Image (cartoon, rainbow, N blue to C red):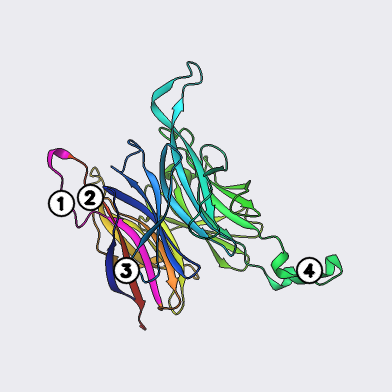
Amino acid sequence: MLTLKSVTRIPTPSYHCAFTSLCQWQDMTYVAYRQAQTHNTTPPGHIVIQRSTDLETWETAATLHTGCDDRDPHLVPTAEALYCVWGMYAPMFDPWSRRLTTQGYDICTYGASTEDGTAWGPPYRLCRPGSWLWSMVEEPLQPQKTRLLTRTLGREVDVASLPTRWYGLSYDVGDGAADRCHTVTLWKGLSPVFWERWATIIDAWQRLSDLQPSEPALFWKGPETLACVVRTEQNAYYGESQSPYAVWTWQDLGTAIHAPAVLHVPGLGWIVSGREYVAGKKKTEKPQVCGTSVWRLHCEEATAKVTRLVRLPSEGDCSYPGLVWDEARQEVLCSYYSQHEREASPMRMPVAADVYLARLTVEKE
C-alpha cells in the first residue's frame, strides 16, 4: 500500500499555478508548471521551472514563453539534456480576411532544452499544428538488438553510440475549439526533438473517439510492450500494443482519471495519479470535481483495473500530477496543483491555485 508522508506547498509568485510535471536530473528535483491569472487561455500563461536539492527550498531555473498561452509542461530528462515539452494555444487566423477571429485557437507543441539546468535554448515547435505531444518515452536497449547489430556490422558495437528511438503520443484536436472527434497518434523519433508520425492508435471513427480521448500517458509495460492510460470525458482507458505498435487493444478502467501520470514503484507495481470526478446524483447533473488521487494500476491481468490507494489533499481546480520514484529517499514524489487552501474570491473572481509536492512511502501489505 501507499501511505501519505507529507504535503508541502511549493512557493510560487503567480496567482494561478497549475498543470505540473516532475523529474529528477543531475541530482536535483525539477518541477514545471504554468503561471497565469486563471485556468483559461486568456490572458495567456507561461511555463516556470523550479528545482531543489532537499525538496524544501526551491529556486527558479527557467521561465519559458512563446508569446501565446503556454500550458501543461512535461519534463523529459535524458543523459545529455533536460527537455521541457508543452502545449501552446494561439488565436486562429481567418484564412479569408486574414484577421483574428473571435473564437478558435490553433494548438501547437513546443519544446526547449538545457544541458546544465540553467541556460535554456529558445522554444521550438514539434509535430504538426493541431497535435499536442503529451507524453514520450525512450526505448530501452535490448541485448538481442545489440547482438543483431554486432552480427550485421561484423564488429563490436559500442552500445552508447547506438541511435536511441523515442516514442510519443499526441492527441489531435483539430481547430482546438469545436472539434469533438479527437484522435490519438503515436510518433517516433531519434530524440525528443525530431519526430515523425507513426500510427493513429485511436481513430476518429472508432467508438472510443466519441468519448473525446485526450491526455495519453505512455509507458513501457515490458521490453517490447508499449502501454497507455488515456483520459476520456467518461472513464479512463488502458491500452497496450506489441512492436511495431500500430495495433492497440483498449479496456475501460471504470473510473474517470484526468491528466493521468503513470509510474512503476519497486515493491508495489504500477500506479497512476490524476484528477478524479464524482458523478452527480442525477443523470442530468454534471460530475463534480473530487480531487487528486493515486490508484494501483492492475495491468498484468487479463482485465485491467484500478484500485484507489490514497486521495491527496485537494479540491476544485486541481490535479495534473507528476510522479517520480526517489531511489535515495525510497519515496514516491507527486507534484500537483489544487485550490483546497484558497477561499472563494469576492465578486465572482477566479480562485487562485497552488502547486504542491506530496511524499508517499510504500508500506508492506
Measured along the vertical axis of the image, is residue 314 above or below residue 203?
below
State the residue in front, 250 or 103. Answer: 103
Residue 105 picture location, percent across and down? 43, 32
Mark earlier in primary sequence (4, 3)? 3
Residue 197, percent from left and from top: 62, 45
Sequence order check: which comes first, mark 3 or mark 2? 3
**Disc 3 element:** loop
Is residue 342 rendered magenta in the image? yes
Q: Quadrant of the C terminus?
A: bottom left
Q: Which residue is mark 1?
A: 343
Observer-side mark, 4 or 3, equals: 3
Residue tagged 2: 280
Q: CA distance from mark 4 to mark 3?
A: 47 Å
Q: Is residue 226 left or right of residue 347?
A: right
Give the foreground label among 1 and 3: 3
The residue that appears at 79% across and 66% down in the rendered structure is 149
* CA distance for labels 4 and 2: 56 Å
Q: Is residue 228 visible?
A: no
For marks 4 and 2, give the one nearer the viewer: 4
Residue that mark 3 sits on: 56
